[in-house]
Image: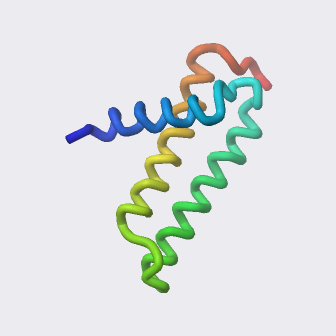
Amino acid sequence: MKTIAEEIKAERQRQLAKFGNQAHLGPFVLLAVLGEEVGEANEAALKMKFEGGKSMDDFREELLQVATVAVQMIGYIDQGDWKGE
């Protein structure tokens, strides 16, 4: 069984393959991306609670994407990719 950290790493690799390095977008654009992912987690939770349209697995997947984008942003800061943008 994968640890959460391993799942975040795998999701990060999937995102890199799909979108490439996004450091050039800057913190404000990626903060909007993070907000969009949080919105999708909210939507999954609400649908699960009130419509039965999503599962706990769907909700967890959205939370994994939230965590991955946040980790990505922290990495850009720590690597010095963003300098007071």
Residue depicted at x 25% and y 38%: 2
> Horizontal and vertical percent for residue 39?
61, 61
Residue depicted at x 56% and y 18%: 78
Front position in the image: 71 or 22: 22
Q: In this view, does 5 lie to the left or right of 33?
A: left
Q: In this view, does 33 lie to the left or right of 13?
A: right
Instruction: Identify the coloring.
Output: rainbow
Residue that sits furthest to the bottom in the current view: 50
Residue depicted at x 58% and y 56%: 38
Residue that sits furthest to the right in the current view: 85
Q: In which quarter of the image is the C terminus?
A: top right
Q: Is residue 40 above or below residue 78?
A: below
> Horizontal and vertical percent for residue 77?
62, 22
Q: In this view, does 69 lie above or below 60?
A: above
Front position in the image: 81 or 19: 19
Residue depicted at x 61% and y 23%: 76
> Horizontal and vertical percent for residue 50?
47, 85
Total number of numbered labels? Answer: 0
Q: Is residue 45 left or right of residue 69?
A: left
Residue that sits furthest to the top in the current view: 80
Q: Quadrant of the N terminus?
A: top left
Q: In which quarter of the image is residue 20?
A: top right
Q: In this view, does 47 lie to the left or right of 30?
A: left
Q: In this view, does 49 lie above or below 37?
A: below
Residue that sits furthest to the left in the current view: 1
> Horizontal and vertical percent for residue 28?
76, 38
